Amino acid sequence: MRRALILVIFLTAIGGVVLITDSSASSGLRYDETVPDDLRALADETWNDFLAAHPGQWECISPPKLQADWDLESRGEYRPGSETVIVRVPGTPATLRSELIHEFAHHVEFTCAEHHELRPDFLRAQGFAPTATWDEADSWENTPAEQYAEATVELIEGRRTHPGGIQITPEAIDVIREWGFGS
């Protein structure tokens, strides 16, 4: 029994490494005709990095559709009705990665029912009441959902290209990390 468990853990770890390192494999992201090849490659890599930070939640995280927009007023947005991430192009690879991660985080909010489990702890870690409204506030930077998305960028990238006045606590990043690993 113990050998079987060790074998399962080993094979799972190898499978995760293949998912993360094999850039020739499809990430599962869906694209429309607006997405150029270089953005597709960056998005695939970024999606795999996003999934690597959430190994305990893979069953509830489905790949979104990606769309590029040259005229988008903001850097990116998420449309829950169509599960579509839209990013403004052109952009630097670092900026596009950060925006993709930010919008992937919003995608998880809408498609992963288990996401509600992390919200009270995240709210507390960021100094909100545990019952604070998740997606409404007096400004973008004071909205818990936006702080969560920015904290996810910081978790995966180790920094943010667009702080936007949001201060992320180390405890908030820990909450996302622990949830992502399934604890």
Image: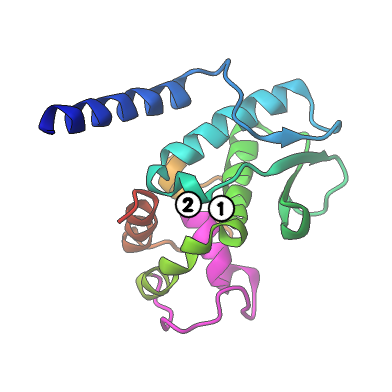
| Residue 104 vs residue 96, the one in the foreground | 104
> Which secondary structure, mark 1?
helix
Residue 101 at x, y = what percent?
57, 45
Q: Tell me if mark 2 has few (under 14), some (14-19) or many (20+) residues whose alpha carbon lies within 10 angstroms of its own.
A: many
Query: Residue 14 shows which numbered tag?
Result: none
Callout 2 touching callout 1 (CB < 8 Å): yes
Instruction: Give the residue type that dot 1 points to.
Output: Ala
* Up-down relation of residue 63 to residue 124 (above or below): above
- Compute the Cα span from label 2 to label 1: 7 Å
x 60%, y 48%: residue? 104
Q: Is residue 138 left or right of residue 73?
A: left
Q: Is residue 135 magenta?
A: yes
Residue 29 at x, y = what percent?
66, 35
Q: Mark 2 or 1, which is nearer the eye?
A: 1
Query: Residue 152 shows which numbered tag?
Result: 2
Label 1 sits on residue: 105
Residue 47 at x, y = what percent?
56, 36
Q: Residue furthest top?
A: 24
Identify the magenta region: 126-152
Q: Is residue 123 magenta?
A: no
Instruction: Give the residue type that dot 2 points to.
Output: Thr
x 56%, y 53%: residue? 105
The quarter holding residue 70 reads top right
Residue 182 at x, y = what percent?
34, 52
The quarter holding residue 139 reads bottom right
> Which secondary structure, mark 2?
helix
